[in-house]
C-alpha cells in the first residue's frame, strides 16, 4: 500500500457511512492477497434486510451501521504491513467523521443563549482534536513513504484516546444507535481484529536502519 492508497482509504472512512466505505474498499481491494482486512475475520456491508436481521442478533451495534462480521476461517500472520496501514487509515477516518458529526450536532444547539460551538472550551476541544488527528495522518503518510512501521501500538493508543474524547462531545446523543459511540466501537473492532495482528507481523519484518530527522 502506497501513501496515495493510504490517504484514499482515510477519506473513504471520513466521508462515507461505514457500510459504503467497506463496500467501496472491497471493490478496490477485493483480492484477499491485498491483505486489506482479510485475515480471519472480515467486516462487510450487510446486504439485504434478511442478512441485516441475522447479524443484528449477534452484533447490534455493527448492524446499526449496516455492516456485519464474517469469519473466513483463515487466520494468518504474514510479514506484510498492509493490515497495519489499513487499520490506521480507517481509524483516523472514523475519528474525523466523529468530529464532523459532533460539530454538526452541537452547531444546532445553544447553551447560555449562544451556539454551543462558539464557547471557547468547546472550540478549544475541537481544535486540539482536529490538530492531533491531522498530525497523526501526516506522520503516517510520511512513515509509509519511508517504510517506517516501528512502535505502532503507541499511535493506536493515541487514536483510541482521541476517539474517546471526540465521542464525548456529543454527550448522551452519541449513544443513539448509529451515532458517534457506534463509530468508536467500530474503530476499536478494527484495531482488535487487524491492528494487533499487524503488530505481531511487524516483528518478522527485516530490520530497518534507524532514521534521524
Image (cartoon, rainbow, N blue to C red):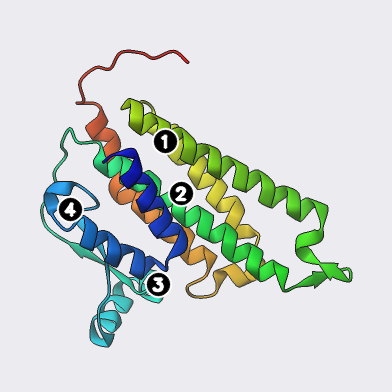
Q: Is residue 8 above or below residue 80?
A: below
Q: Are marks 4 and 1 in contact (CB under 8 Å)?
A: no
Quadrant where the image shows the N terminus: top left
**Real-space CA distance between mark 3 and mark 4, rounded to the nearest whole angstrom:** 21 Å
What's the residue at 39%, 47% (across, down)? 7
* Residue position for label 3: 65
Q: Image quarter for residue 189?
A: bottom left
* Residue position for label 4: 40
**Given this view, does label 2 or label 4 mark the residue nearer the observer?**
2
What's the residue at 64%, 68% (across, down)? 104
Q: Are marks 3 and 4 in contact (CB under 8 Å)?
A: no
| Residue in front for this viewpoint, 105 or 7 | 7
- The earlier-in-sequence mark between 4 and 1 is 4
- Measured as percent of width and height from the top left, residue 174 is found at 58, 68
- The earlier-in-sequence mark between 3 and 4 is 4
- Badge 4 marks a residue whose secondary structure is loop
- Badge 2 marks a residue whose secondary structure is helix
* Residue position for label 1: 140
**Real-space CA distance between mark 2 and mark 4, rounded to the nearest whole angstrom:** 23 Å
**Given this view, does label 4 or label 1 mark the residue nearer the observer?**
1
Query: Which label number is shown at residue 92?
Result: 2
Q: Are marks 2 and 4 in contact (CB under 8 Å)?
A: no
- Badge 3 marks a residue whose secondary structure is loop
Q: Residues within 10 Å of mark 3 (few under 14, many from 20)?
A: many
- Measured as percent of width and height from the top left, residue 42 is found at 22, 59
Q: Is residue 119 left or right of residue 94?
A: right
Q: Are marks 1 and 2 in contact (CB under 8 Å)?
A: yes
Amino acid at each position: 500500500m502506497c501513501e496515495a492508497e493510504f490517504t484514499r482509504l482515510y477519506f473513504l472512512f471520513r466521508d462515507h457511512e461505514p457500510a459504503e466505505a467497506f463496500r467501496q474498499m472491497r471493490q478496490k481491494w477485493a483480492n484477499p492477497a491485498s491483505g486489506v482486512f482479510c485475515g480471519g475475520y472480515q467486516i462487510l456491508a450487510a446486504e439485504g434486510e434478511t442478512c441485516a436481521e441475522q447479524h443484528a442478533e449477534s452484533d447490534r451495534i455493527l448492524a446499526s451501521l449496516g455492516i456485519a462480521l464474517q469469519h473466513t476461517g483463515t487466520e494468518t500472520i504474514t510479514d506484510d504491513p498492509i493490515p497495519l496501514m489499513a487499520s490506521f487509515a480507517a481509524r483516523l477516518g472514523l475519528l474525523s467523521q466523529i468530529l464532523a458529526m459532533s460539530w454538526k450536532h452541537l452547531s444546532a444547539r445553544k447553551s447560555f443563549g449562544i451556539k454551543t460551538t462558539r464557547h471557547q472550551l468547546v472550540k478549544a476541544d475541537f481544535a486540539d482534536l482536529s490538530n492531533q488527528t491531522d498530525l497523526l495522518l501526516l506522520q503516517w503518510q510520511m512513515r509509509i513513504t519511508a517504510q517506517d512501521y516501528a512502535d505502532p501500538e503507541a499511535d493506536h493508543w493515541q487514536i483510541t484516546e482521541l476517539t474517546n474524547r471526540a465521542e464525548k462531545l456529543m454527550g448522551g446523543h452519541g449513544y443513539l444507535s448509529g451515532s458517534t459511540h457506534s463509530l468508536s466501537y467500530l474503530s476499536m473492532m478494527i484495531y482488535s481484529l487487524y491492528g494487533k495482528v499487524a503488530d505481531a507481523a511487524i516483528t518478522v519484518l527485516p530490520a530497518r536502519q534507524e532514521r534521524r530527522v
